[in-house]
Amino acid sequence: MDELLREKLKYNEQGLIPAIVQDAQTREVLMLAWMNEESLRLTMESGETWFWSRSRQELWHKGATSGNTQQVVDITLDCDSDTLIVRVRPQGPACHTGARTCFFTSLTGEPEAAPLITVPASPQIERPGTQLSVVDMPALDLGILLQDLFRLIQERRESRPENSYTSYLFNQGLDKILKKVGEEAAETIIAAKNDGTKELTSEITDLIYHLLVLMVERGVSLRDIMAELGQRAGRPANPKYKNSG
């Protein structure tokens, strides 16, 4: 944002302007915070988000204590010059509850529990042989987790970023994906024969991930799977997932 644009900013009576923080990759709205001139300057100079705390009346650097920083991709100004959108690469959850976004309560449908998970564009799901990284919290919602990972895989298929294992699979084509599914299935069977559950958990996670890649490649949605599971269980799929995939 150049100096002319900064001069156009319309701060409120307290010298603040709302900043909507958005995941640059998924376009998901993560949080709403407030900036003043100083926090905006620090944000632009450091490349990480700084805000003004109205309750503590002080500057705060997002992630300074938790490590959940936000790397700034760009900052845009709305047509009225009184609201900012800050697009970031989040390095962990945005919400103090541990949720990836502060916006998880629906007013138009059944309220959902806070999705206490993180599914960033993590190297852990870009390499074979590693398990998916999640925050170990009791309110883990597997359905939300699968939706997030499914959408991430869809995005990888469209954008094909370099140095991405998911992109590599799609670039190699269906036969490569099928081969990996077969390999992970075999490794899951072997792990199931061994003592303990840690190795088995890791292999099952890898298998699920590769199955999701196969689903995206072949046009099978999570809604299709939920509907089939619902039929087999003798009940319709949960409407909570009706728009997934």
Image (tube, rainbow, N blue to C red):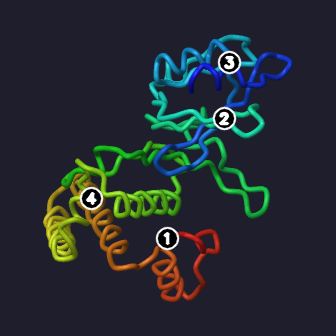
Which mark is first along the chain, 2 or 4? 2
Q: Give the mark nearest the N terminus, 3 or 2.
A: 3
Mark carried by residue 167: 4
Q: Evaluate if marks 1 and 4 touch, with contact meaning CB atoms under 8 Å apart.
A: no
SS class, disc 4: helix
Residue labelled with disc 2: 77
Q: Is residue 32 left or right of residue 149?
A: right
Q: CA distance from mark 4 to mark 2?
A: 33 Å
Label 1 is placed on what type of residue? Answer: Gly
Q: Hey, what amino acid is under mark 2? A: Leu
User: Along the line of sight, which residue is nearer the eye, 155 or 144?
Assistant: 155
In space, the residues marked 1 and 3 are separated at their CA atoms by 37 Å
Quadrant placement of the N terminus = top right
SS type, badge 1? loop
Element class at badge 3: strand
Which mark sits nearer the N-terminus, 4 or 3? 3
Work out whether 125 lies above or below 14.
Answer: below
User: How many angstroms separate mark 4 from mark 3 (CA)?
Assistant: 39 Å
How far apart marks 3 and 2 lie (CA) works out to 18 Å
Q: Residues within 10 Å of mark 2 (few under 14, many from 20)?
A: some
Q: Nearer the viewer, mark 2 or mark 1?
A: 2
Q: Please name the residue that numbered disc 3 is placed on.
A: 52
- Crowding near the residue tagged with mark 4, few <14, some 14–19, many ≥20 C-alpha atoms within 10 Å: many
Q: Nearer the viewer, mark 1 or mark 4?
A: 4
Disc 3, disc 2: CB below 8 Å? Answer: no
- Residue 185 image-quadrant placement: bottom left
Q: Amino acid at mark 3?
A: Trp
Choose the circle earlier in sequence order: 1 or 3: 3
The residue nearer to you, when weighing 10 against 34, is 10
Which tag, 1 or 4, sits closer to the chain's start? 4
Where does label 1 land, which residue?
245
Residue at (52, 88) in percent of width and height? 231
